[in-house]
Image (cartoon, rainbow, N blue to C red):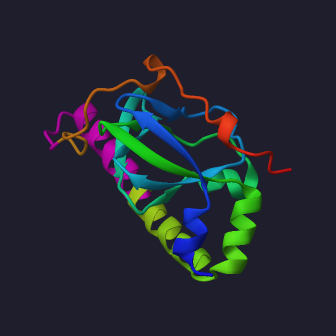
Amino acid sequence: MGLKESLAKLSMVTLKRGEVLFKEGVPSNGAMFFLFEGQLDIYKHIEGKHTKLRSILPGEFFGEMAIINNSPRAASIVTVSDSAKIGVINRNSFVKMSQEAPEFLFLLLKRVIERLYETDSKIRAIKRAKDDAKSGKVTENPMKDSPAVDPDSIPMISVDDVIPNSE
């Protein structure tokens, strides 16, 4: 069985514009996700502000840290399209997908490494801009295209109903 067939078996969640899938710092439910349709934005609390890090587009996995170590969510995820269709991957699904479609692990690892580089670079640019502002230098805002959204002000959507217990 291939990756497409494995993804087709996932439990699905549909979110509407403005709905929050999860918030930064909340305990993880041990699930990661795959975006089938729509667009989500990732926000992180940096230097006292909710800052958009990037968008999640169809075909992307996200939330994988929850599968690996069940740590609190590292960022907030907000739906920005009219709706978003999301597949839920719990630990059992993750193991099955890994066995049935070994290319899944390679794609996931590749993307995680790319994201680490992207996020690190973006955070450094934000901090550099802040340091420049303190010293009086004029620099372009590295997050100039980021809308001012506070994920904490938007109610979080519970997806626990569609996430089978992965223990």
Query: Residue 44 occupies which quadrant of the picture?
Result: top left
Answer above or below: position of 1 versus 84. below
Instruction: Look at 37% across and 58% down and name the residue there.
Output: 58
Answer above or below: position of 32 versus 81. below
- Asked if residue 129 lies in the magenta stretch, the reply is yes
Q: Residue furthest right?
A: 167
Q: Quadrant of the N terminus?
A: bottom right
Instruction: Look at 54% across and 32% down and name the residue there.
Output: 23
Instruction: Report if residue 109 is visible in the image.
Output: no
Answer above or below: position of 58 versus 30. below
Which residue is at the front of the view, 158 or 136?
A: 158
Give the residues drawn in magenta, as a range: 120-140
- Asked if residue 165 lies in the magenta stretch, the reply is no
Q: Where residue 32 sits in the image (x, y, percent)?
A: 61, 52
Query: Residue 29 occupies which quadrant of the picture?
Result: top right
Which residue is at the front of the view, 124 or 35?
A: 35
Answer above or below: position of 153 versus 69. above
111 vs 63, left or right, is left
Q: Where residue 17 sits in the image (x, y, percent)?
A: 34, 31
Instruction: Look at 86% across and 50% down and name the residue there.
Output: 167
Instruction: Look at 54% across and 28% down and name the residue there.
Output: 157
Q: Does the magenta stretch mainly form a helix, a strand or a loop? A: helix
127 vs 33, left or right, is left
74 vs 37, left or right, is right
Instruction: Report if residue 80 is visible in the image.
Output: yes
Q: Where residue 141 sits in the image (x, y, percent)?
A: 20, 41
Which residue is at the front of the view, 135 or 138?
A: 138
